[in-house]
Image (cartoon, rainbow, N blue to C red):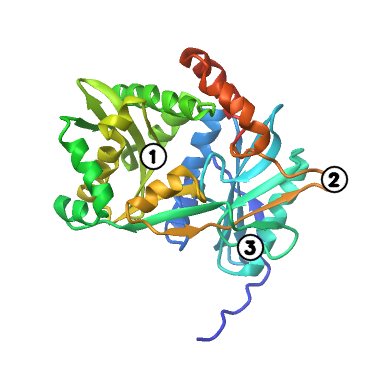
C-alpha cells in the first residue's frame, strides 16, 4: 500500500464548543475515527466543565479545504493541592490526540502544550491517542485496559466467564438480588449513595455528584445506571456509557455488604446482558492500574489486559503532577480518609477531587 500523501498547510485552531453546528461537525468526525472514545466527544467536554468547573477546550487541525484531519480534547484542571494541568481528556481514562498523520499529531501536541503554558498549567497529560514524537515523556507500565466481545445470549455470556468467577456470579444470583436500570433522580440517588461509600472505603475523595448528573444528562440515551438491590436497599451500582457498539461501565462500586452478597459480580454480569439487549457487541471494562486489585478482578472475568501508553510534559524545573493514589506520599492520607465519617467525606471530597482531573 502506498503511503498517504503529506497534508499541506494544516491549521490548528480552538473549536467553538458553544456553537451547535460546530459541535455536530466535530462529533460526526470523532465517531468515524479509529481509536475514538466517549471522552473525545464535545458533550463530554462540556459536561465535565459544568460538573467540575474545569474549563473545556478542543483543538482542531484542518487542511487547506477546511476538512478536519485531527483533534485533541482538553480540560484545564487545577487545585491548591495538585497544581494546574492541561489534561486530555479531563476525568477520563482515555482521550488523547486523534489524527490522520503523525505530523498532524505533533502539531496538535505542541499547540496543546502552548495553550497549557498560556493558562499557567505547569504540566500536560495525553491519555492515549496518537502520541507525540518529541518533547513528551511516555508512560507504558502504569495502566492496562480490558475489553472483549459480548456473547450471544445470557447463558452463553455466563459460560464465557471463567469457572471460578462464574461460580461467584451464581452464588449472587441465588441471593434474591434485584436489578434496576434507569437514568432518573432515583437512579442517580442510589448510585451516588453507593459510589460515595465505595470510594470512601478505598480511601479516595468522591467526585462531585454534579459530575455524574451532567454526564448522564449530556449522553442522554447513551448512558444509564444499573443498580443492584438487596431487600430494597441499593448495594451496588454502576453508571455506564454506550459508544460505537461498546458499553463502558465507568463509575461503579458497592457498599461493604456487597462483597458477601456478590452484588458487584451480579452487577457486571447483568450489565453485560443489558448492554447486549441494547445492541452492544463489546464490553469495555475500562482501565486499571497494573497489578492492582481491580486489574486481577478483571482478569478473573476472562479479560486480557492491553497496556495503555500515556504521555506527559512538564515545564522546565517543574516535577510531573502526581495524582496516583498508590504514591507513597498519599498512604497516610488514604488510611485516615477510610476512617472518616461518610457525611464528612462527602462534604470535603468533591472539593478535593475537582483538582484531580
Residue bearing mark 1? 219
Q: Position of residue 217 (x, y in %)?
A: 39, 32
Q: Which mark is in front, 1 or 2?
A: 2
Q: Position of residue 59 (x, y in %)?
A: 62, 51
Residue at the extreme right of the image, as rendered: 317
Residue 335 relative to residue 191: left or right: right
Residue 103 visible to an observer of this rendering: yes
Identify the secondary structure beneath mark 3.
helix
Q: CA distance from mark 1 to mark 3?
A: 27 Å
- Between 223 and 18, the residue placed more toward the observer is 223
Residue bearing mark 3? 105
| Residue drawn at 50 percent across, 18 percent down | 346
Query: Local crowd at mark 1 within 10 Å, few (<14), some, or many (≥20)?
Result: some
Vertical comparison of 302 with 172: above or below: below
Query: Local crowd at mark 3 within 10 Å, few (<14), some, or many (≥20)?
Result: many
Residue 158 relative to residue 65: left or right: left
The tag earlier along the polypeptide, 1 or 3, is 3
The tag earlier along the polypeptide, 2 or 3, is 3
| Residue drawn at 62 percent across, 44 percent down | 87
Q: Which mark is in front, 2 or 3?
A: 2
Residue 30 relative to residue 354: left or right: left
Mark 1–mark 2 CB contact (< 8 Å): no
| Residue drawn at 20 percent across, 48 percent down | 277
Amino acid at each position: 500500500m502506498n503511503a498517504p500523501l503529506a497534508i499541506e498547510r494544516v491549521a490548528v485552531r480552538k473549536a467553538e464548543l458553544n456553537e451547535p453546528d460546530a459541535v455536530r461537525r466535530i462529533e460526526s468526525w470523532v465517531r468515524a475515527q479509529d481509536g475514538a472514545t466517549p471522552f473525545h466527544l464535545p458533550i463530554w467536554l462540556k459536561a465535565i466543565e459544568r460538573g467540575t468547573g474545569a474549563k473545556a477546550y478542543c483543538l482542531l487541525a484542518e487542511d487547506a479545504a477546511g476538512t478536519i484531519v485531527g483533534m485533541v480534547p482538553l480540560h484545564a484542571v487545577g487545585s491548591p493541592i495538585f497544581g494546574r494541568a492541561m489534561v486530555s481528556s479531563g476525568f477520563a481514562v482515555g482521550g488523547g490526540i486523534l489524527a490522520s498523520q503523525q505530523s498532524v499529531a505533533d502539531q496538535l501536541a505542541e499547540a496543546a502544550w502552548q495553550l497549557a503554558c498560556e493558562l499557567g498549567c505547569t504540566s500536560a497529560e495525553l491519555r492515549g491517542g496518537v502520541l507525540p514524537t518529541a518533547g513528551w515523556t511516555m508512560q507504558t507500565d502504569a495502566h492496562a485496559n480490558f475489553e472483549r466481545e459480548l456473547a450471544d445470549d445470557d447463558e452463553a455470556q455466563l459460560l464465557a466467564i471463567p469457572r471460578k468467577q462464574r461460580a461467584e456470579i451464581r452464588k449472587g444470583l441465588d441471593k434474591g438480588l434485584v436489578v434496576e436500570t434507569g437514568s432518573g433522580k432515583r437512579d442517580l440517588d442510589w448510585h451516588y449513595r453507593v459510589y460515595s461509600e465505595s470510594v470512601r472505603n478505598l480511601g479516595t475523595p468522591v467526585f462531585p455528584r454534579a459530575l455524574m448528573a451532567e454526564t448522564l444528562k449530556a449522553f442522554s440515551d447513551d448512558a444509564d445506571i444499573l443498580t443492584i438491590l438487596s431487600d430494597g436497599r441499593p448495594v451496588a451500582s454502576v453508571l455506564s456509557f454506550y459508544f460505537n457498539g461498546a458499553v463502558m461501565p465507568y463509575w461503579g462500586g458497592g457498599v461493604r455488604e456487597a462483597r458477601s452478597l456478590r452484588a458487584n459480580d451480579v452487577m457486571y454480569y447483568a450489565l453485560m446482558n443489558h448492554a447486549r439487549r441494547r445492541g452492544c457487541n463489546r464490553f469495555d471494562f475500562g482501565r486499571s492500574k497494573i497489578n492492582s486489585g481491580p486489574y486481577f478482578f478483571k482478569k478473573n472475568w476472562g479479560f486480557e489486559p492491553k497496556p495503555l501508553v500515556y504521555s506527559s510534559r512538564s515545564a522546565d524545573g517543574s516535577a510531573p503532577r502526581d495524582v496516583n493514589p498508590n504514591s507513597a506520599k498519599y498512604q497516610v492520607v488514604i488510611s485516615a480518609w477510610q476512617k472518616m465519617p461518610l457525611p464528612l467525606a462527602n462534604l470535603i471530597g468533591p472539593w478535593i477531587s475537582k483538582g484531580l482531573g
